[in-house]
Amino acid sequence: MRQDKTPRAKDQFSRRGFLQASLLVSGMSHLPQLFERDVLAAENASPPPKHPLEPLSSTELEDTVRILTRDKKLGESFRFVSITLLEPPKQVVVGHLPGRPFQRCAFAVLLDRAKQAGYEAVVDLVDRTVTRFTQLPSGVQPPIMLDEFGECEEVVKRSPEFQAALRKRGVTGVDLVMVEPWSAGMYGTEEREDKGRRLMRALCFVRSELKDNGYARPLDGVVAVVDLHAMQVLRVEDYGTVPLPPESGNWAREYLPAVRKDLKPLNILQAEGPSFSVEGTEVRWQNWSFRVGFTAREGLVLHTISYNDGGQQRPVIYRASVCEMVVPYGDPAERYYRKNAFDIGEYGIGMLANSLTLGCDCLGSIRYLDAPLVDSRGRAVTLKNAICLHEEDVGLLWKHTDWRTNQSEVRRSRRLTASFIATVGNYEYGFYWYFYQDGSIQCEVRLTGIMNTTALAPGQTPQYGVEVAPRLNAPFHQHLFAARLDMNVDGPNNSVYEVNTVSLPRGVKNPHGNAFRAEETLLSTERQAQRRVNANSARFWRIVNPDRRNRMGQPVGYRLVPGENCPPFVQPDAAVMRRAGFALNHLWVTPYDPQERFPAGDYPNQHSTGDGLPRWTAADRSVKNTEVVVWYVFGHNHVPRLEDWPVMPVSSIGFQLKPDGFFHRNPALDVPPPEMTCRHDTHA
Ligand SMILES: [Cu+2]
């Protein structure tokens, strides 16, 4: 089927045709897509915060910049990598009384380009003083900033060496070239000249016109290595020329020859409004309450999740976020083995969040929340509509028909969704947290966007990917995510059990061979709690409060139910696995330490090895009946399909947290029957 109405699309990419296409648009400037988001300069003073966990407002962000600049005499060479709320100690949050003053501190990561040094700073926004200003150890690279992506692209395009590499491939204009900087990582194979530098490695693609999908035409074999401090091309690595794949791969509406005609409108009407309320950043819905936070690094963060059980407020999770991810690619070619972006720790996925004014996939009565952020120059910018809150009908909640009496009771299930979507270059990640009426919580990551691609030489069969269009290879890769769940099941002191279902051998106690049972094992220490999923034993984990019993005398708990998952397929001693040691296990449990927030360490960018979970857990601390943090790692193994091209239908993965002896019975018995909350369409 022809998907592309670009006239003579194939012809354009004959060598001569492509040359002409490039020349036609030369001189046309283009801004990187990352900068075209709906960000607004913050104008008015924000109201003072009402709760210690509210994200820093635009005014507080500006104050932080002002205080730091004044007290530390920051010059032009300083950049603000991120400023976020320094979350107060738990006792401040738990003891907070509405209307009472509370401490308020900002945590800033800075970069001095002149000294080529990173800094951490803490600003007390009540006393208006800098309480900490620490230079990061040499070699520690703060995350890459948005404008570094843009500047990197510009500097590569201006490079004579790069332009020569383009000419060698028949590309004479740079305007339609897409320079895609990737984090450089640290592999022990770096050139001598790389040492100590802040680097990115840029891969390149080329378009036929501005809206063309450049990923259809990888300029394979050209990698520009850029020193971000000097903002100079350090070198252009040339791994040989592969001709451009012949086909376009467009998905934008103007390229589509036709759309389906048989789809009738499906409108979600909530004439009386949604059933949730938002006060400040606190959300209440169907006995649930939680606070919405947002950080430049993690994006959406949920705080103080609790359930009102018949008037009793019962905490479940103190803090929840998807806090790291890594995307290892399986192609061992010299130019590709470093493709392993840590999209959260190296880039800051909150900084890459979409403004949902540019398109939101949700229906119904939506409440958006903005995300105040700072750009690298310390200007407060508000990412409009970064977070989406809405309700969804999700089918059956429970049902039974008594066949003797013909009484039927059915309840529809509804969930409250808190979500955001980030665009990381070619890919989109949607992060969704769902709350259900039966006390369940679900985390889902939706993957969509465009696959990263490489070019195949004529006649070449891909060994480490799938040819998704003629001579266009989509490499095998994995998306490995880590969620940090600071559990608080009916109180801070929790323990974690593993539950495996085992079938018992035949014998005196099992004469018919049908015996099987669920067996629980307490995970007492950090090492014992390093576990992987196991479909053969239907493995799950139970986080319990040993001091709170349900009416059957069992400790109240929540069950962590894995969804789709996979092990990492790179070798355990490969450089990327040393950098992403968190991905070696699906489950980790640590005793709560406010410093332990990011499972690949605070600064994975160009970090070589071992920080984060592997380092912390080497102490093998006790995780029994104490404040525990549960880390769940879940991976999507992406073996590309033809159907994933040119834009990928959503793949989704995640996990569930289900009450397990937390309630005395099904907590959703009191959900009203559908005739009270739904209106039916009927056909005559
Ligand atoms: Cu993928």
Image (cartoon, grey):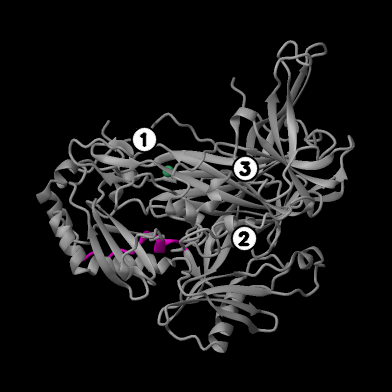
Residue drawn where x is 18% and y is 35% of the image: 459
Question: In the image, which is nearer the foreground, mark 2 or mark 1?
Answer: 2
Residue 519: x, y in percent?
A: 74, 31
Residue 99 vs residue 269, the one in the foreground: 99
Give the Cα distance between marks 3 and 1: 47 Å
Q: Which tag, 2 or 3, sits closer to the chain's start?
A: 3
Measure the C-alpha gap from mark 2 to mark 1: 46 Å
Residue 81 vertical position relative to residue 577 in the rendered view, above or below = below
Q: How dense is the environment of label 2, judged by Cα within 10 Å: few (below 14), some, or many (20 and up)?
A: some
**Pointer 3 or 1: first along the chain:** 1
Label at residue 597: 2
In front of the other: label 2 or label 3? 3
> SS at mark 1?
loop
Is 285 placed left or right of 645 in the picture?
A: right
Q: Amino acid at mark 2?
A: Arg
Task: Report the front residue among 472 and 137.
Answer: 137
Q: Which residue is mark 1?
A: 259
Quarter-wise, where is residue 239 in the image? bottom left
Residue visible at 27% across and 30% down in the picture: 1
User: Which residue type carries mark 3?
Assistant: Arg
Looking at the image, tell me whether mark 2 or mark 1 is earlier in sequence order. Answer: 1
Q: Which quadrant holds the C terminus?
A: top right
- As rendered, which of 75 and 333 lies closer to the eye? 333
The residue that mark 3 highlights is 531
Number of marks in the image? 3
> Bounds of the magenta span?
27-38
